[in-house]
Image (spheres, rainbow, N blue to C red):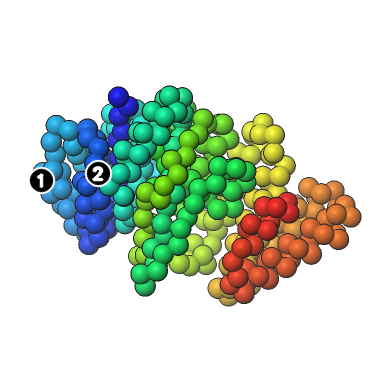
Amino acid sequence: MQTISIIIPVYNRAHIVERTLGSVLAQSHRPLQVVLVDNDSSDDSLAVLQGFAQDNNTDDFQVKVVTESHHTAGAARNRGAKEATGEWLVFFDSDDEMHPALVADYLAAIEQAGGDVDIVSTGATLRFPDGTTRALPFHMSDIMAVQMLHSQLATQRYAVRKAFFEKCGEWNPELPVWNDWELGVRLLLAEPRMAYMGNERVFVNHSGEASITGNSFSAKAGQWEHVMDVVEEELSASSHPEATRLKRLLEFKRVTLAAQYQREGLQEQSQELCKGAYSRLCDSYSNSLKWRVIVAPIVRTLFARIVNGKRGSAIIARKLL
């Protein structure tokens, strides 16, 4: 039987992490290993994790609590992965929740694929503070392009074979933002064998400012750009057949960030980011008639749509670029 380890990094979540832990305890599948990593919290998070382990650790529900002083989620997740004994890893955030059948469904999908798979993905439900929800489906078609613009391989939305995860280089511990987007790109560039179990088995709680990244892009200006530069280097080093298109989509991601900066009043940063992205897009099209007459005007229109808070621009860009 395939075995799974769940890894949850925690930083200053003493007030809400028990909700996540409760959803892990409610998993219908056993045996199960849970690795909880306190990421140098300054509140009572470590005591909460230790209490959970003391109350619930059994032979078929093994709970291990460790600490990681390097203060990034990537470093904490790597620390947890080193402690994991399962053949499969499920990384999870400390403010989200699992459906009771999440692990069982992952294992069923792996078995259905004959074990010949590296990543199993799931749909998710996004829950807002006002109680409203939105479905987050997983798109298996055009998967690399979807990842570039939508980051559908988010932390809590897949199980990965431990050996494949290690082969791909684990989490980048130096990225404070968008680290799951970067890892998702890297995993897909390695051409994994994938399965999708077709159910929304994860509940992502949109907690706004209480989340690690918060709601503001301007508060971490420069960090987002750094992650995109890292991904650009990875695309350049790859032999992916759609590398040119993926780089164009990366430039649109920069345009999207520039639009968010403009919405938040960072005009200078927005203009600089847009100028560079437009220039590189123009070069990728060799300043052709198609670029000047079709692509450039549509990209500028999409930029304006994002500034005005309208949704759907990424879908259009994926079909355009």
Q: Which of the 4 quarters of the picture holds residue 78?
A: top left
Q: Callout 2: few (<14), some (14-19), or many (20+) C-alpha neighbours within 10 Å? A: some
**Depicted 281 relative to depicted 7: above or below:** below
The residue depicted at 31 percent of the width and 33 percent of the height is 4
User: Foreground: 12 or 114?
Assistant: 114
User: Foreground: 315 or 270?
Assistant: 315
**How far across and how far down the image is residue 216, in percent?**
48, 67
Q: Which label number is shown at residue 55? A: 1
Q: Horizontal placement of 270 versus 126: left or right?
A: right
Q: Is residue 170 visible?
A: no
Q: Quadrant where the N terminus lies?
A: top left
Which amino acid is tagged 1? Asp
The residue depicted at 26 percent of the width and 53 percent of the height is 20
Q: Callout 1: few (<14), some (14-19), or many (20+) C-alpha neighbours within 10 Å? A: few
Q: Horizontal placement of 34 versus 266: left or right?
A: left
The residue depicted at 73 percent of the width and 51 percent of the height is 321
Q: Which of the 4 quarters of the picture holds residue 15?
A: bottom left
Residue position marked by numbered label 2 in the rendering: 27
Which amino acid is tagged 2? Gln
Label 1, label 2: how many angstroms apart (C-alpha)? 16 Å
Q: Secondary structure at mark 1?
A: helix
